[in-house]
Image (tube, coloured by chain):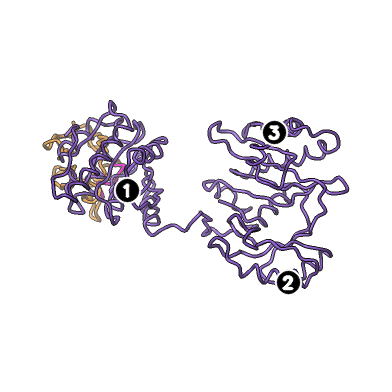
Chain colours: A purple, B orange
Amino acid sequence: MRFFEYEAREVVKRAGIPVTDFGFTTDPGEAREIAQRIGGPTVIKSQVLTGGRMKAGGVKFADTPEEAEAYARDILALEINGHMPRGVLVDPKAEVEQEYYAGVVWDGTRKQPVMIFSPVGGIDIEQVAEEQPDKVGRKHFSNILPFGDFEAKEVIASTGVTGSALNKLTPIVARLAKLFVENDMTLAEINPLGRLKDGSFVALDAHMDIENEARGRHKKLLKDLGVGDEETRQAREATPFELAGEAVDSQDHRGVAGNVTEFDGNLGLVIGAGGGSLTLFDAVRAHGGQPANYCEIGGNPSVSKTCGLAKLVLQKPGVDKIAVMMSIVSNTRVDIVARGVIKACLELGHDPAEKIAIFRIPGAWEEEGFKILEKYGVEYADRSVSLNEAARRAVEKIQGTTAASETGAPGLIPGGHT
Amino acid sequence: MRKDGTFIAVEVADETAADAALATKLTEACPVDIFATADGGKLEIVEKNLDECVLCRLCMDAVGGRGPDLVKILKLYDDGAVLV
């Protein structure tokens, strides 16, 4: 979940990192009052969860409080990339000698946070990494063991920063790393981190993302920031199909059968298991298939929950067939999933053998599962068939059906266990 | 009494169903709530939960190891094979 800039700045401030004397408001008159309090030129910034606000006119520089009010009024009415602003941030226009970059992101491959520092800030760090790679320092650190400030010092020093700047930057980067871990963040970035004329440093902008699943652990922080439970802050609002998926998953405590994302293809997916859903989704697309949805199933969901998910996918307009595929499962039972998806077909009046393009879930209780599939004539694959091959067969089958329905010829039925 | 789901059927001997003590044991034992106890202490089979049966045999243990005699779990997808 992404924070607005004014919220991210508040988080930075609470961590003891110096920030400017900014103010947030939704009222142009109050923007003038904040500018008056600041007592000098100000920057008025639109608070939207999208990029490109400078280009869109969402950031303006005001010399007087009256200008600040007028700009705030304009910006509050300005839609940027389909987003209306939450408010405006009124910030002192700082006299900056040099702009730096400090950030921490979650490295999903290493499963560790990585600290990134550059003495070249104010622009995208990706651009700096490409054009001046020696000016970007990186260092992974543990999110379990206590963080040592020396780790921050090392990464800053690796970019050539020395002396007083190094000493002043070290606690800032160390605090950023600590707040990242303490708040279960996936991104904590200060850009630019400005060095002022007096040699002090101040955070001039901040971007932060908190892990969605960790929201429950940070209720106080979210409450303090005024973030409501209903605010998902996803890239887009959930569709009715996706909300229905959530309802299916929350119907009982057993396992997972949900986390549905809507796409517009014709092959419904009931997929999951230890990263299997992502792998399978990609495999379907790689073979030219058009998924109707993404979803996650695992942890031994109940028959009714599996049935609910399969029904939801089967009823999605445009879905011709479903593919039921998982990695080899240990804590999910093959027979339970088989019962759920077959029951969904039956309750909707479909022949499971026609509607299920392939069932590829090997693992716990597979003998029972395969008996069920055989009884209903559903094509299934055991562990000797890879996820990739299973996805290929599903795509081939649905494309055969599509071709057949276009030509009036019978659908292609590839070989398998039936 | 017997009730059938799509995949699972459960058959309970009449004397077992009428035995309040056994009915309570069965109700407590089943992890997916296939059994319930009616007001008079008589056993009821909850039809909507039949297909949730995880073949755990706890109901058969609950009747003192006389499982297939007093409580039968039948796998309808396997020609009605009785769980033993």
Quadrant of the rendered image containing residue B83:
top left
Cα gap from disc 2 to disc 1, whole angstroms: 54 Å
Q: Residue at x 21, y 49 (%)?
A: A345
Please report, as a chain letter, where disc 2 is located: A
Please provide the residue range marked out in magenta: B30-36
Q: Determine if the magenta segment contains residue B55.
A: no
Give x and y (percent) for residue B34. 25, 46
Residue A318 in the image: above or below residue A372: below
The answer to whether residue A2 of the structure is visible from this angle is yes
Q: Residue at x 73, y 40 (%)?
A: A173
Tell me the residue that label 2 is attached to: A69
Please report, as a chain letter, where disc 1 is located: A
> Of A233 and B44, which appears nearest the observer?
A233
Left-right relation of A378 to A130: left
Cα gap from disc 2 to disc 3, whole angstroms: 41 Å
Q: Earlier in the sequence, mark 2 or mark 1?
A: 2
Mark 3 neighbour density, 10 Å: few (under 14) some (14–19) many (20 or more): many
> Of A283 and B8, which appears nearest the observer?
A283
Tell me the residue that label 3 is attached to: A137
Mark 1 neighbour density, 10 Å: few (under 14) some (14–19) many (20 or more): many
Callout 3: helix, strand or loop? Answer: strand
The answer to whether residue B71 of the structure is visible from this angle is no
Principal secondary structure, stretch drawn in magenta: loop
The amino acid at mark 3 is Gly
